[in-house]
Amino acid sequence: MRIVSRSWMLFGGAMMLAMLAAAPLAAQKDSRPNILFIFADDHAYQAISAYGSKINQTPNIDRLAREGMLFRYALVTNSICAPSRAVIQTGKYSHLNGVLNNRIVFDGSQQTFPKLLQKAGYQTVIFGKWHLKSEPQGFDVWKVLRGQGYYYNPDFRVPGGKDIRIDGYATDIITDLTLDWLKNQRDPDRPFLIMCQHKAPHRNWMPAPEYLTLYDGVKIWEPPTLFDDYSTRASPAREQEMEIARNMRDVADLKLISLLEAKKRGEELPAVFARMSDDQMRMWDAAYGPKNEAFYKANLTGRALVRWKYQRYIKDYLRCIASVDANVGRLLRYLDVSGLAKNTVVVYSSDQGFYLGEHGWFDKRWMYKESLRTPLIVRWPGVTKPGSVDTHMVSNIDLPETFLEIAGVPVPPDMQGRSLVPLLKGEYVPDWRKSFYYHYYEGPPAVHKVARHYGVRTPTHKLIYYYQKDEWELFDLELDPYELHNVYNDPRYARVVKELKAELKRLRAELKVPEVDPDLQR
Ligand code: SGN
Ligand code: CA
């Protein structure tokens, strides 16, 4: 008797839980899908296990891929932060949205997709890294990092002017803000767009307290091109300043310092460290102190020193990603328990890719693959086939049109991308783009000294033009996946060069790219 009544009680409890979970969903009167956009800063696809990472595990981001669609060739139009963000806001290339480089202030009065969603009745929210300098427009609610933002105790710009400082670790805080809005501020009757935009894993790669010793004692896999000598490439590959060997800073990047001791001695610390509390510094020193001591003792030189720098860099970078992934998990769990998951499209992406030691580099900017490609994973329950992989050349410029179509809002004709919705539905799209235009404008003397260039990528080839130097590169992507052999001058490729130059010309005309780089006309 007793046993029977207990199982009935359990059954009743389970029913109640199921009803609770389903309740909020039934309540959303306007049933257009919600959009949760989780956006990292500088998250390389090589550091996501769903993309085949050799160096880390990202179980929560992988869950999105398992339940949604992973885009293997998501390309950015201009591989740098503010320009990528302006492209996503507007659906227009840099020469039309105005943000050619990280220095230019975004003209927020122009048409953006959040404004269009807001007008169509969506709740629009953004938390975290914004980096477009002017105030966010088209958002009902916003709190954005000032400038690049800090990992520890970051300052947020808020409507009305005065910054607020929030103590803690940026990735956790930005997720907390997102969760708090979803739980406590959302109007449950109307759909929403919420952009949860992390600072991580951007330079200077500062891990959260709980991940400071993750990967200690482990040797992370090294990319085969760590010691690239740039032979066969055009001159810009040799003239950049983004080498792990030469351009890592001892204190800010490699953390070769004891924070508390330096503070006691009255030394000026880089701002990223100076704002940490004594307790935070103590935890930091406890983690890095012994590792730094071992490094000093080893007295490394030559390749061994480069290898050490790579290990220090990549571990910190991956530690930052561990926080991002854990926080993706927190969001997904809340979508589950609240019942929101079913009607919410979740997108995970980054503003561009990043070098994790390939070609000996960190940073981005190039049209070479690690910075041209960016992660893009979309879970749209009932629409995307779980575990599907798309191999079309898609782009960050396609995102705003995708969001508008998901919301059923007409796409303005002046946007230059293309909605991904047919691909998300698994439809056959024979007229998808067969070539892709890229243009990078932040040339030297800007940080990392990567020459201005533009070019065209097809599924099989990549042609790059460094226009201030009048130098070209051509890569055969099928024979040379690491992009180490510039075959521009190889007579066997003369026909390909001719065809791609014609295609480049056609794309530049179609996309209304001015003949002269607008930044050089000023
Ligand atoms: C900072 C970084 C650079 C980085 C740019 C642009 N230096 O200047 O390494 O390339 O941002 O990054 S740091 O001293 O601040 O670490 S972007 O993501 O904003 O484009
Ligand atoms: Ca970035």
Image (cartoon, grey):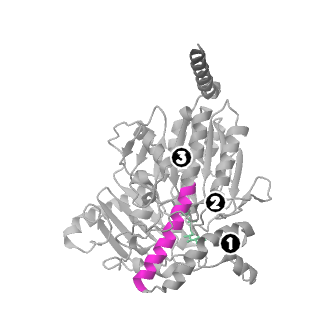
CA separation in Å, label 1 and label 3: 36 Å
Q: Is residue 69 magenta?
A: no
Considering every residue shown, the one lying at the far left of the view is: 492
Query: Which one is in front, 423 or 509?
Result: 423
| Span colored in magenta | 302-323
Place of residue 404 in the rendered image (x, y in percent of width and height, measured from the top left)? 54, 40
The residue to which callout 2 is attached is: 132
The CA distance from mark 3 to mark 2 is 17 Å
Residue 321 forms part of the magenta stretch: yes
Q: Amino acid at mark 3?
A: Pro
Dot 2 alpha-carbon crowd within 10 angstroms: few under 14, some 14 to 19, many 20 or more: many
Q: Position of residue 184 (x, y in %)?
A: 73, 38
Placement of 254 over or under 435, stated as above or below: below
Ligand 2 closer than 8 Å to label 3 CB: no
Q: Mark 1 or mark 2: which comes first in sequence?
A: 2
Res. 111 in view: no
